[in-house]
Image (cartoon, rainbow, N blue to C red):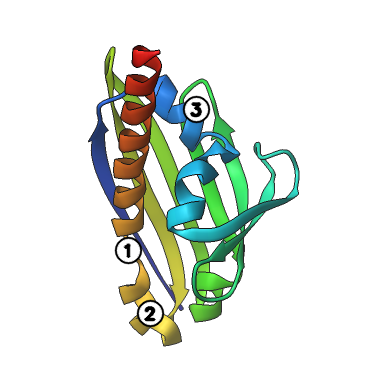
Amino acid sequence: MQTYGSVATEMEIQAPAREAWALYGTVDLTVITVPKYLAAVDIVEGDGGEGSIAKLTPLTGSPYYEKFTKVDNKHMVKETEITEGAFFDLGFTLYRIRFENISTGKNSCITRTTIEYEVKEEFVANLSRVSILPSINIAKDIEAYLLAHRKHEDSE
């Protein structure tokens, strides 16, 4: 038997949806994640688009692999699934992260993040490891990055 579940959050970002998507929807997200959350991100298959596989190396712990299962630029939706390491080592059989950017105005959007998971019954104690907090922190960092770069460009 397996346990299924999901967690989700929405964060308002004071930046146009397309600007936020330019980071979320591409490997350019590494500008935010590598120095703060990850030691390295290497695309080992593909070009960073749908079907690509990335090797993510955390600041501590072992590397894991993520496949970009959906990259929809029109609707600003990206889905990734861990395929090896990380949560799979903890008894999970599915760990999917979905990012959606929803425009709420000229200079604002909502980033909705959903984590879907399945875990083997004997590893149900590991459900406490599922956390939306990293996604919240990344959304805050994206907003700060976009605001800082907009101010920098405005002053030139």
Q: Find the distance from the CA under tag 2 to the CA under tag 1.
A: 11 Å
Q: Residues within 10 Å of mark 1 (few under 14, many from 20)?
A: few
Which residue is identified by label 3? Answer: 22
Q: Which kind of residue does numbered mark 3 sit on?
A: Ala
31 with respect to 27 (left or right): left
Could you say where residue 49 lies in the image, as x and y percent from the top left?
Answer: 65, 36
- What numbered label is drawn on residue 149? none
Could you say where residue 109 lies in the image, as x and y percent from the top left?
Answer: 29, 25
125 with respect to 40 (left or right): left
Label 3 vs 1, first from the N-terminus? 3
Label 2 vs 3, first from the N-terminus? 3
Classify mark 1: helix, strand or loop.
loop
Q: Residue furthest bottom?
A: 122
Seen at 35% across and 67% down, the residue is 130
Disc nearest the viewer among 2 and 3:
3
Which residue is identified by label 1? Answer: 131
Disc nearest the viewer among 2 and 1:
1
- What numbered label is drawn on residue 126? 2
Q: Find the distance from the CA under tag 2 to the CA under tag 3.
A: 33 Å
Classify mark 2: helix, strand or loop.
helix
Q: Residues within 10 Å of mark 3 (few under 14, many from 20)?
A: some
Disc nearest the viewer among 3 and 1:
3
